[in-house]
Image (tube, grey):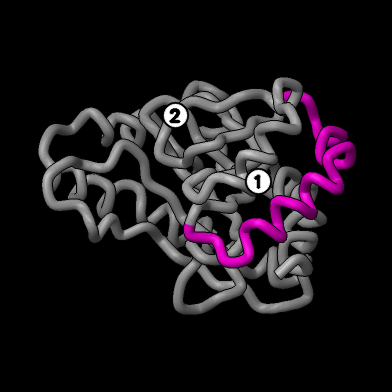
Amino acid sequence: MNFDGFNQHDFDTFSINGLDERMEAIQSRIQPKFQELGSYMVDYLSAQLGNEVYLHIAKHARRTVNPPKDTWLAIADNKRGYKKHPHFQIGLFDDHVFIWLALIYELDHKKEIAQTFLDNYQTLKKLPDYYRISLDHTKKTSISLKQLEKKDVERFRDVKKAEFLIGQHLPSTDLRVKNGDKFINTVKDTFNSLIPFYQMALRSK
């Protein structure tokens, strides 16, 4: 595998003005790395889960004016799409990488999945304190797992547009981001810790 991490040039993509110009940079700089990294992680997760999963690389096809502020790959058990399914994500904003188990607003059976997470709230809180929670995948902001409260998970259950993403943020300056092997090991460790919650979500459907 040729994945050698993400560098400042990749993060600088998000300071390029213009939709076409930024998309061209995403396609030439970042997406080849997503293809390498994603193909490897698909094989890894398929082996860990005991079933086939599929790689999806964000196309940003709906955008007509504003250039994307972030970009990502997703891995889900559905070949046609990922947004309606619990899925794993790796992606970049201009200053950090995110590594998520993602449950976004299009999710089927969202209420049932959220209730399962509420029922297992204490188990969720046993994940590392430095893990981050995003309640809106379109925003850079997140809270630490330590800050998570039950009302946040209840909101995920009760509000149609609410989301729940859990995992890690690594700053662009983190040495693990710049080293392919270290980054892959970090992704593996993060996903391994989140697989029980991914499986919990699948069983809730």
Q: Amino acid at mark 1?
A: Val
* 156, 4: nearer the viewer: 156
Q: Position of residue 34 (x, y in %)?
A: 44, 55
Mark number, residue 44: none
Mark number, residue 187: 1
Mark number, residue 140: 2
Disc 1 residue crowd, few under 14, some 14–19, many 20+, Cα 10 Å: many
* 58, 83: nearer the viewer: 83
Disc 2 residue crowd, few under 14, some 14–19, many 20+, Cα 10 Å: some
- Compared with residue 115, is residue 56 higher up or lower down, i.e. above or below? below
Q: Is residue 122 magenta?
A: yes
Magenta region: which residues? 106-130
* 42, 164: nearer the viewer: 164
Residue 184, visible in the rendered structure: no
Q: Position of residue 69 (x, y in %)?
A: 31, 36
- Compared with residue 151, is residue 165 higher up or lower down, i.e. above or below? below
